[in-house]
Image (cartoon, grey):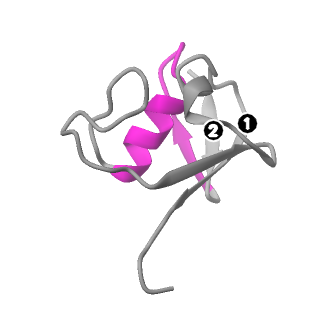
């Protein structure tokens, strides 16, 4: 059961969890396997793993490992 650092919080995930699982946990939204919202809406999220941006096309293939650091950033309007 890997413990991952997400935006300075520690979160435990089941073995085999991926970046899709981390984004779903952080946003509180159900996501499809490809990282898109199950409700068909927009997500507006960027993910960096150890400082490198992970494209959404790689979220499902990027498995979480113990101690990895993720930054999950959501876009907001009005900046």
Residue 56: in magenta span: no
Give me the C-alpha separation between circle 2 and circle 1.
Answer: 5 Å
- Of residue 75 and residue 30, the one placed in the foreground of this image is 75
Q: Residue at x 44, y 55 (%)?
A: 44
Provide the residue designation for mark 1: 68
User: Which image quadrant is residue 64 in?
Assistant: top right
Provide the residue designation for mark 2: 4
Dot 2, crowdedness within 10 Å: few (<14), some or many (≥20)? many
Residue 15: in magenta span: yes
Locate residue 39 relative to residue 64 in the image: left or right.
left
Q: Residue at x 47, y 30 (%)?
A: 20
Q: Residue at x 48, y 66 (%)?
A: 75
Q: Residue at x 41, y 78 (%)?
A: 77
- Of residue 55 and residue 22, the one placed in the foreground of this image is 55
Please determine whether, in this image, residue 76 is positioned above or below residue 22: below
Residues at discs 2 and 1 in contact (Cβ within 8 Å): yes
């Amino acid at each position: 059961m890997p413990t991952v650092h997400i935006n300075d919080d520690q979160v435990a995930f089941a073995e085999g969890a991926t970046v899709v699982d981390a984004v779903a946990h952080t946003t509180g939204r159900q996501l499809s396997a490809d990282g898109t919202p199950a409700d068909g809406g927009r997500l507006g999220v960027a993910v960096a793993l150890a400082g490198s941006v992970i494209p959404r096309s790689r979220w499902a293939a990027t498995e979480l490992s113990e101690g990895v650091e993720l930054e999950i950033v959501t876009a907001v309007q009005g900046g």
